[in-house]
Amino acid sequence: MNQMNNKQFEKMAFRVKLKRWLITILIVIVTVPVVLWIGYKFTQSLAGHQTQLLNNKMETIQEIAAPNIQISDQALDDTSVWGGKVVSHQYKEIDGYRIPWSTAVGQYNWSFNWIPNTSLIDTTQTAAYTRLTQQKIPLFYNNNVAKPNIKKAFELPAVAKMKGYVAEVAVTFKHPLTYQQIQARLPHNLRASWYWIGVSGKADPTIEQNHFLGIQSGLPEGKLTKLDYQYFQKSLKKVSDTTLDSYNNFSLSNYAHKYAKQHPTLKQAKFAGVILTGKSESFKAMRNRSWITESSVGATIKRVPYIKPTY
């Protein structure tokens, strides 16, 4: 009798254990996917937030620190559960001609985002080039720096002698000029495609990895509107240290904030230089101008019959 009771008890105990195991397994089967799904959605939410921050950061750089550089797109690339990249394909437009430029890349993960400072610039004593496309970079200079890292250039006469090209040339002014003063000095067949706001003190622009601060002309005529400048000024005010680098203790973000405060309107703004674009022959009119101290050629391209210059 006792032996039978023991067997019945063992069977009942086994059934209870089996039931518990089955319940536990069922809970695991249901819970683990739910937890994984919640975790995935949470991490993707974090990554999505970082993606948006990175997009905003790259758009700000495009607005205030992309000298005559346009973007054709900006999209996610190489994405995974852990993070990914934002890639922006860039080009230059010079009098109706598009010239390939380096690709801008930002990276992100769940917790932060960054734009790698990979120094994609090759320099010599006399020039700077993009590493990916080997296009020549138009440089600006600080008149307070006698011996910049890259030797001062005076290349307007050489461009003027070229025949059948379109070109961009960065010209540095002897003294900062207002927008109206610049427009009054330019011939009708050249455009001020980008306006440089300069640097302060003894800062050397030639070491800034092409991160010059300035505003792109939003009109084909090379003109700026009050609304263009208002948007630019707001972008200068909100830019952070994590968006722009510092070079030899010169903080681009601090300078941006200071400039925005001192020059709240287009009428009050002063520019230290411009990037001029047009047909190479048109640059003859810019030779021997006393208000220009340096001139640095950037991208150039041979004209072809099937693409007409726009001015």
Image (cartoon, rainbow, N blue to C red):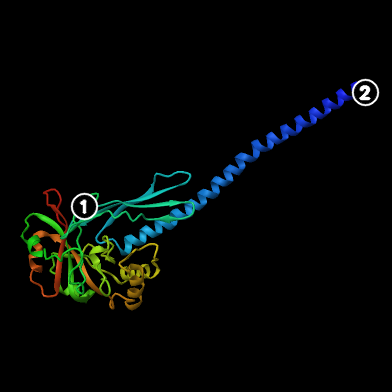
Q: Nearer the viewer, residue 205 or 22?
A: 205
Contact (Cβ within 8 Å) of mark 2 with mark 1: no
| Residue receiving disc 2 | 2
Q: Determine the residue positioned at 68% across, 38% down.
A: 27
Q: Is residue 179 above or below residue 15?
A: below
Give the quadrant of the N terminus. top right
Amino acid of disc 2: Asn
Residue 66 quadrant: bottom left
Helix, strand or loop status at disc 2: helix
Q: Position of residue 221 (x, y in %)?
A: 20, 65
Amino acid of disc 1: Arg
Helix, strand or loop status at disc 1: strand
Tell me the tag on residue 98: 1
Q: Determine the residue positioned at 36% across, 68% down.
A: 253
Q: Determine the residue positioned at 23% across, 74% down.
A: 179
Q: Nearer the viewer, residue 230 or 128?
A: 128
Tell me the tag on residue 14: none
Residue 136 quadrant: bottom left
Q: Alpha-carbon distance for marks 2 and 1? A: 97 Å
Furthest residue in direction right, as rendered: 1
